[in-house]
Image (cartoon, rainbow, N blue to C red):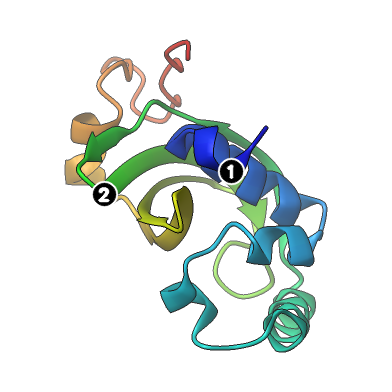
């Protein structure tokens, strides 16, 4: 798929897939210049790999949900199951929100934050209120 026609959701899907498989050079091509921090691909990949190695990061699975586009910015919610040595040793489910920007005609991942419990219904409206720990059902693309 050409970068110019890739949706924000597909960009996040490819980015998380690249991280899960530790294809960090592929991930680099999907992040914004701000997220690259002015670093070359070689330096950025080396730093990401070192950080993932030290923290023993393992992405187990993820689900990307329909995002919201507002001009040249998009917000894409995801549910991620991952483990690391410091913050998530048990592999708990995390609700995340990715912000993407348009750069050079393509969507690029610009930032990622954890969605706090009070904000989950805003980004995950199909969540089953009777089972708050159950991830929502993804809407079809």
Is residue 91 something one can see in this rendering?
no
Q: Residue at x 47, y 74 (%)?
A: 33
Mark number for residue 28?
Answer: none
* Residue 89 visible (yes or no): yes
Image label count:
2
Could you say where residue 95 lies in the image, as x and y percent from the top left? Answer: 41, 44
Which residue is the site of mark 1?
3
Q: Secondary structure at mark 1?
A: helix
Instruction: Give the residue at the far top of this rendering.
Output: 140
Q: CA distance from mark 2 to mark 1?
A: 15 Å
Using the rendered view, name the quadrant where residue 83 is placed.
bottom right
Q: Are marks 2 and 1 in contact (CB under 8 Å)?
A: no
Image check: 98 left or right of 44?
Answer: left
Q: Nearer the viewer, residue 32 or 141?
A: 32
Q: Position of residue 53 (x, y in %)?
A: 79, 77
Q: Position of residue 128 (x, y in %)?
A: 32, 15
In the depicted view, which residue is nearer to us: 112 or 121?
Answer: 112
Mark before the other along the chain sequence, 2 or 1: 1
Which quadrant is home to the N terminus? top right
Disc 1 packing (10 Å; few <14; some 14–19; many ≥20): some
């Amino acid at each position: 798929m050409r970068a110019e026609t890739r949706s924000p959701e597909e960009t996040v899907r490819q980015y998380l897939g690249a991280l899960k498989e530790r294809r960090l050079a592929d991930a680099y091509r999907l992040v914004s210049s701000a997220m690259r921090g002015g670093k070359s691909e070689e330096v950025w990949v080396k730093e990401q790999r070192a950080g993932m190695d030290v923290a023993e990061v393992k992405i187990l699975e993820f689900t990307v949900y329909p995002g919201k586009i507002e001009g040249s910015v998009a917000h894409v919610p995801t549910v991620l199951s991952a483990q690391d040595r410091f913050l998530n040793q048990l592999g708990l489910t995390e609700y995340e929100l990715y912000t993407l920007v348009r750069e050079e005609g393509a969507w690029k991942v610009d930032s990622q934050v954890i969605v706090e419990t009070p904000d989950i219904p805003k980004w995950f409206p199909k969540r089953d209120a009777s089972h708050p720990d159950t991830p929502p059902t993804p809407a079809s693309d």
